[in-house]
Image (spheres, rainbow, N blue to C red):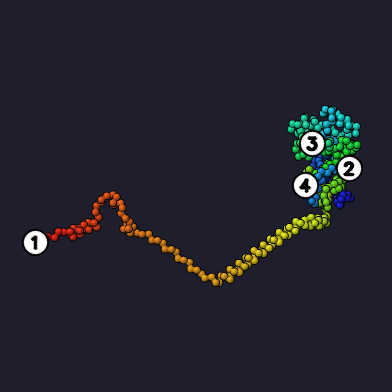
Amino acid sequence: MADGAGIVLDRAQVKKAVQALQAFLKTKSTSDSLFLDETQQISMLFTLWKIPKAAQTICIPLPHGQRSDTDDICLFTKDEPNMTSEQTQRFYRKLLEEKGVKNITEIIPYKALRTEYKPYEAKRRLLGNCDLFLSDDRIRRLLPSHLGKHFYLRKKEPLSVNLQSKHLARDIQRVIQGTSLKVTNKGCCCMARVAHAGMTADEVTDNIEAAVQTVAAKLCTKGPVMKLIHIKSQTSVSLPIYTSDLNHLSVLEAGKPAQTSKKEGAAAKKQAKKNKTEDVKQTDAAGEEKNVEEEIPLLVPIATPNKKPKLEKPSKKKQLEKAPKPAAAKKGRKSPNKMTKKAGKTDSKVKRKVPKVK
């Protein structure tokens, strides 16, 4: 049993899950291959109860190394005063040999990184040639602007090492054979590599227990930490090895009122205001309905006014009779009408000369 800040793992159950995962990886290996591909990584997936407030990187030392001796490791060092890049490289290579460090395959001073690896193609070539990158902690903050985003997208950013340490070999070996867990403040899940497919079930189980203890001790959160823990490979499903008790829910809920009392008070006030406004609206609506019901019997139906009679269009004859005749005066004389002829006849009759009586 492994206990880390309230996290208890059942070693037998963890070993069964590891054996099942290794059996799955063996079935996926091709028949032409003579041995199991050791590049298959075994990772742990941590699910937290709360999203952390700040991002954090946790270095996890493992009892059994997860990297082979054939991995290429690059070290970025500080520029020594009054030395060229080649002299600085020879100086640190000699220092590592004296301390007993033999895993470093390439040493790049900071000045060489700025000049020789300035082109984009050179950075990509360096990224593909090395499996792990280490950095002197004195220049660690200066590297992101010179390395570029591809180192961080592929999760190969340099890990800090104190080259002035008295136990340099032990510190570098812990970093190389260990792993790191990146806890972000954007989600509640994080993953770390803890073993490979070529390790035995007991070795993988030991690494899992050590990783759980370290993460539970170094994680900067209060109260219950872990909700779920799974193990998986690059091509397999996640196998659960730890599930938190539901007793943590009461602890989480108990801590909420003290932290959110002000918020709840403000929310209660807003809810009370909403209820009051709704009650007022309901009473107003009820009063209006009552008034309408009381006034309806007293109303007298009002006769709808008749439609206005349409104006009759005058007939063509009346229009002709009423319309003036200015055109006759303008155009000149015209042939007399019948009425004028009759009028002329009557005038002639009236104006006949009477014979004089002598």
Determine if residue 343 is in view: yes
For mark 1, give the secondary structure.
loop
Horizontal side of residue 298 vs 182, given as left or right? left
Determine if residue 106 is in view: no
For mark 4, give the secondary structure.
loop
Mark with earlier residue (4, 3):
3
Q: Report the residue marked by disc 2.
A: 63
Mark with earlier residue (3, 1):
3
Camera-side residue: 194 or 174? 174
Q: Report the residue marked by disc 1.
A: 358
For mark 3, give the secondary structure.
helix
Q: Residue furthest front?
A: 358
Q: Amino acid at mark 4?
A: Asn
Point out which mark residue 185 bears.
Answer: 4
Q: CA distance from mark 2 to mark 3?
A: 32 Å
Q: Amino acid at mark 1?
A: Lys
Residue drawn at the location 81% of the way across and 41% of the way down: 40
- Binning the other alpha carbons within 10 Å of mark 4 as few (below 14), some (14 to 19) or many (20 upward) gives some
Q: CA distance from mark 3 to mark 1?
A: 157 Å
Q: CA distance from mark 2 to mark 4?
A: 29 Å
Point out which mark residue 142 bears.
Answer: 3
Q: CA distance from mark 1 to mark 2?
A: 176 Å
